């Protein structure tokens, strides 16, 4: 892949998807099999929809999962793990990445091939852990259940989620690479945002082009413009107005790079920001830092979200359910945008009676901290950065300057 410029003439190194997973995939499969065996499973069957959270399971094990496809993995207690894809182009890519560690089956009939592999690899009466089935359509779910009717099936999503929660330096480096792309996208937006006549749509096109050029599998952003932005927009036809003096450009970049996610959110201004906006930006940074301070290994994960939500409640004039903009304030990131092992406990609307079961913060985990809500006199406000947990606590790994940025 040719080097890509970031808009200033500086060449940025690109990092395409790894050519082979090698020993790492073998180790992950071995660990997952051991966990499955300890839980009494003789095999696992994993369904993944590339547009849903189940895709993260295949990214974790196979190193890659496209966002516009579906796949099924069959992992017997012994023997080859198998990945089945009905999309010939995606099957070819899976084979390039995972062949040697995972046997890839290309088929025209996904369910028929899954049935054949289950019949060949999984003896009748085996206790099978099924994963990702909640993401399947009703019809696919019924087909999967029918082909496993001779086995004893139990949902095992928590088992693989637990495996994915254990993170190391490899994962940290993957996130750092993804964050570099997110940072470059945000900084490019701020450089071009004051160009005369430029629209939010123009910014979106340029920013997403840059992210893909830097090697991201997916590089998307939302954009909000105006003096008091009320919404975030994802479609070009919603962003046709030119950005003018005194306007804000707010955006969030979401990147999937080599199987790992990152996200950076910023507020930029054409001209001098108001005192109210500067004060609010300082509050947002303080909220983020308060969340970072909770990232001490051994503390429950829900502490991170609780600190953020308490701070937002103090600053926001609307109740959570009534705020026209407010959404999730944080999430753990990994091979999914929101990691399944943490998601229930970072949900502000969760049943807190279950908090005793909260997973613990540990070194190597990565969190997106993005407080966001509506201010009575400023409209929608936001900030977003990626934090990595170390043995000594959380550190920011996104490097775009925080607070209000000046466009141009």
Image (spheres, rainbow, N blue to C red):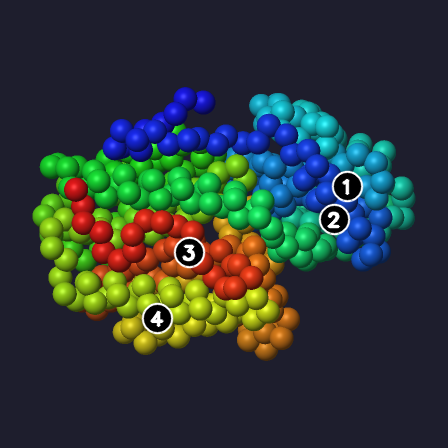
Which image quarter: residue 8?
A: top left
Where, by quadrant of the figure, is residue 99 drawn? top right
Which residue lies under the disc numbered 4?
312
Give the foreground label among 3 and 2. 3
Task: Give the mark, 3 or 1, whose residue is nearer the N terminus.
Answer: 1
In this view of the protein, can residue 240 be seen by the observer? no
Name the residue rendered at 17%, 66% in the picture: 276
How many angstroms separate mark 4 from mark 2 (CA)? 39 Å
Q: What element does badge 2 sit on?
A: helix
- Give coordinates of residue 66: x percent, y percent: 54, 35
Q: Do the residues under discs 3 and 2 have CB atoms within 8 angstroms? A: no
For label 3, the residue is 396
Q: Residue at label 1? A: 75
Which residue is disc 2 drawn over? 32
**Label 4 element class:** helix
Q: Nearer the viewer, residue 298 or 263?
A: 298
Q: What is the CA distance from the residue labelled 3 to the residue labelled 1?
A: 37 Å
Cα gap from disc 1 to disc 4, whole angstroms: 44 Å
x and y, in percent, of residue 349 in the image = 48, 70
In x, y percent, where is residue 187? 28, 43
Question: Mark 4 Cα within 10 Å, few/some/many (few <14, many 20+)?
Answer: many
Q: Are marks 1 and 2 in contact (CB under 8 Å)?
A: yes
Q: Are marks 4 and 3 in contact (CB under 8 Å)?
A: no
């Amino acid at each position: 892949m040719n080097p890509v410029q970031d808009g200033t003439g500086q060449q940025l190194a690109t990092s395409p998807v790894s050519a082979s997973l090698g020993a790492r995939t073998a180790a992950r499969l071995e660990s997952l099999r051991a966990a499955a065996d300890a839980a009494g499973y003789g095999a696992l069957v994993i369904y993944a929809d590339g547009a849903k959270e189940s895709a993260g399971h295949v990214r974790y094990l196979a190193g890659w999962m496209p966002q516009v496809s579906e796949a099924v993995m069959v992992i017997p207690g012994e023997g080859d793990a198998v990945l089945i894809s009905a999309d010939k182009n995606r099957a070819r890519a899976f084979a390039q990445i995972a062949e040697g560690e995972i046997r890839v089956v290309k088929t025209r009939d996904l369910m028929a091939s899954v049935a054949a592999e289950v019949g060949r690899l999984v003896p009748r009466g085996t206790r099978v852990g099924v994963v990702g089935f909640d993401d399947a359509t009703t019809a696919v779910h019924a087909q999967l259940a029918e082909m496993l009717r001779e086995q004893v099936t139990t949902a095992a999503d928590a088992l693989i989620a637990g495996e994915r929660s254990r993170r190391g330096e490899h994962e940290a480096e993957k996130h750092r690479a993804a964050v570099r792309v997110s940072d470059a996208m945000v900084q490019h937006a701020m450089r071009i945002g004051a160009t005369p006549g430029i629209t939010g749509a123009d910014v979106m096109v340029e920013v997403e082009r840059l992210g893909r050029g830097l090697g991201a599998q997916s590089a998307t952003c939302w954009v909000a413009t105006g003096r008091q932005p009320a919404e975030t927009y994802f479609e070009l036809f919603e962003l046709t107005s030119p950005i003018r003096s005194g306007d804000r450009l707010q955006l969030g970049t979401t990147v999937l790079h080599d199987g790992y996610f990152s996200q950076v959110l910023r507020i930029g201004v054409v001209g001098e920001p108001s005192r109210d906006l500067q004060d609010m930006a300082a509050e947002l940074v303080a909220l983020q830092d308060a969340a970072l301070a909770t990232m001490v290994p051994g503390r429950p994960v829900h502490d991170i979200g609780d600190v953020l939500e308490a701070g937002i409640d103090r600053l926001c004039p609307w109740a959570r359910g009534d705020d026209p903009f407010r959404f999730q304030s944080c999430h753990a990131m990994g091979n999914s945008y929101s990691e399944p092992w943490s998601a229930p406990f970072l949900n502000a609307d969760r049943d807190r009676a279950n908090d005793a079961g909260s997973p613990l913060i540990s070194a190597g985990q990565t969190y997106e901290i993005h407080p966001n809500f509506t201010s009575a006199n400023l409209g929608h406000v936001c900030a977003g950065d990626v934090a990595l947990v170390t043995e000594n606590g959380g550190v920011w790994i996104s490097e775009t300057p925080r607070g209000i940025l000046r466009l141009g």
